[in-house]
Amino acid sequence: MAFEQAVRALSSRQRNLLRLQLIDGLSVDAISNVYNVHRVEKLNMSEQSFQSMVRLVESRLDVSIERVLRTQQEVE
């Protein structure tokens, strides 16, 4: 429930970024190519660290990310 509320609070672009990473499995570099931007370096996070963080988040979720994101996509 809380996760669904958090996803609803995201902008369309933010939900799309989340969808590209978690559902489509795109890397940070691939996503940056989709949006024609350079990798954000102010986080000072490597691709490996980012992927590790994503795996940790995925392992802790109690709801289906795919279900929530697909539901949000259908609403828009």
Image: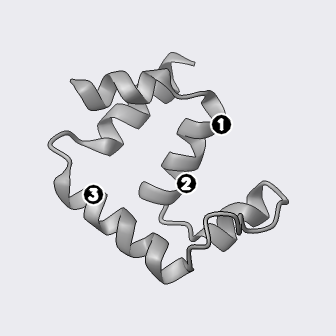
- Front one among 41 and 70: 41
61 is higher (above) or lower (below) than 51: above
Residue 36 can be seen, yes or no = yes
Disc 2: CA contacts within 10 A as few (<14), some (14-19) or many (>=20) = some
Residue 23 can be seen, yes or no = no
Location of the N terminus (image quadrant):
top left
Q: Position of residue 70 (x, y in %)?
A: 42, 34
Q: Which residue is mark 2?
A: 20
Q: Which residue is mark 1?
A: 13
- Badge 1 marks a residue whose secondary structure is helix
Q: Residue at x 71, y 64 (%)?
A: 40
Q: Mark 1 or mark 3: which comes first in sequence?
A: 1
Residue type, mark 2 in image: Leu
As measured in the structure, the alpha-carbon distance from the residue carrying label 2 to the one carrying label 1 is 10 Å
Disc number at residue 58? Answer: 3
Residue type, mark 1 in image: Arg
Q: Residue at x 43, y 73 (%)?
A: 51
